[in-house]
Image (tube, rainbow, N blue to C red):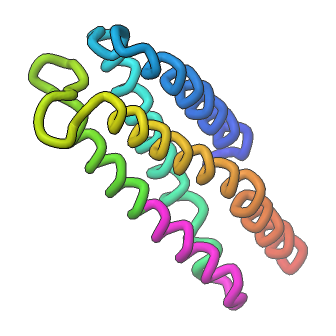
Amino acid sequence: MISYEELHTQNHKITELSNLLGHVLTERTLCDNGECCHLFSKYMNEVNQHMDVVDRNLYSELLLSDDVKLNNTAKSFMNGTVEIRRIMKQYTSKWCNKSDNRFSFGGKGKGYDQFLQDSEQMFTIILDRIQKETEGLYPLVRQLQDEQRRAA
């Protein structure tokens, strides 16, 4: 089981990267920099690793509970994970040119303004998820664990 401190550390790192990339990507010339794409790749890896850890460590307790609210919360977060992964995959396939480690703005309907809009939307969705985890998921799992310890 991962500690809540580690989960919060992961969330903090993702938040910092979201904020940094959100500012860097507003400068068009920096988007053509390979280091920017490297940082973005690191960001995507951090988000995916965090969701994997949450999937493996938190949902099972909620799903095994007799409480319907806890079951529904776990299912809602699981569905959210699927949706975030879909959005991230769609974003990278549209905007990331892996062959030269650069963002790609060419092609039909792929202008820089749309790139910025899609980037902001993705960062917002991920940051919203982090907030929901911190304020909703973690306290529920903690409460359930405390109740299980008291019952044992």
Q: Residue 79, percent across and down?
A: 46, 70
- The foreground one among 115 and 131 is 115
Find residue 9 and report its image quarter. Answer: top right
- The foreground one among 2 and 124 is 124
Q: 141 left or right of 82? A: right
Residue, far right: 150
Res 25 seen here: yes
Q: Residue 120, percent across and down?
A: 49, 38
Find residue 101 and report its image quarter. Answer: top left
- The foreground one among 135 and 52 is 135
Q: Residue 32, percent across and down?
A: 27, 12
Q: Against 47, is 70 above or below? A: below
Q: Which residue is painted at 35% across and 53% down in the image? A: 87
Quadrant of the snapshot with the C terminus = bottom right
The part of the chain drawn in magenta is 65-81
Is residue 4 a member of the stretch shown in magenta?
Answer: no
Res 1 seen here: no
Q: Against 36, is 96 above or below? A: below
Q: 40 left or right of 18? A: left
Q: 4 left or right of 146? A: left
